[in-house]
Amino acid sequence: MAGRIFFVAGAAVGYVLGARAGRRRYDQIKSAADRVWNDRNVQKGVNEVVGTVQGFVKEKAPEVQDAVVGQAKKVAAKVKRTDDGEPSPSI
């Protein structure tokens, strides 16, 4: 309950401060954020992280594929129909 109260209070304070600051302050904050994001060092760090994540995904993709195929085969076996055309009771 306390978490909800803090959330609502924080949202209210943010709304009031945002409304008072207006569009000009929003544009200042956005401009500063754009300068930081477009900084060469920030972009270098982002590219390093992206490269690391891509390498991890390429490394783990075969394992994930094998796991998914294995589970799909198990599910297919469970829904295999019996001789009388009814689904097996193990569903």
Image (cartoon, grey):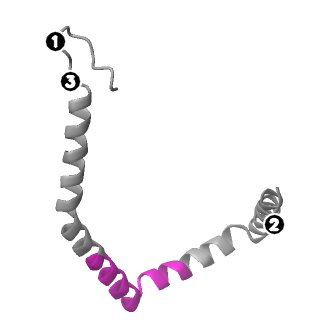
Identity of the residue drawn at 68% across and 75% down: 25
Identity of the residue drawn at 74% across and 67% down: 18
Secondary structure type for disc 1: loop
Callouts 2 and 3 close, C-beta under 8 Å:
no
Q: Classify 10 Å Cα crowding around label 3: few (below 14), some (14-19), many (20 and above).
A: some
Q: Quadrant of the C terminus?
A: top left
- Res 19 quadrant in image: bottom right
**Whole-percent x, y for residue 68 in the image:** 24, 48
| Highlighted magenta segment, given as a residue range | 32-52
Q: Earlier in the sequence, mark 2 or mark 3?
A: 2
Identity of the residue drawn at 41% across and 86% down: 42
Q: Is residue 78 left or right of residue 45?
A: left
Q: Main secondary structure of the magenta part?
A: helix
**Whole-percent x, y for residue 41 in the image:** 38, 91
Secondary structure type for disc 3: loop
The residue lying furthest to the bottom in this view is 41
| Residue tagged 3 | 80
Q: Amino acid at mark 1?
A: Asp
| Residue tagged 2 | 13
| Residue tagged 1 | 83
Please say if 24 is above or below 4.
below
Q: Classify 10 Å Cα crowding around label 2: few (below 14), some (14-19), many (20 and above).
A: few
- Res 28 quadrant in image: bottom right
Q: Amino acid at mark 3?
A: Lys
Please say if 82 is above or below 62.
above
Q: Amino acid at mark 2?
A: Val
Q: In terms of depth relative to the viewer, which is nearer, 53 or 27?
A: 53
Q: Nearer the viewer, mark 2 or mark 3?
A: 3
**Whole-percent x, y for residue 69 in the image:** 19, 46
The residue lying furthest to the top in this view is 84
Q: Earlier in the sequence, mark 1 or mark 2?
A: 2
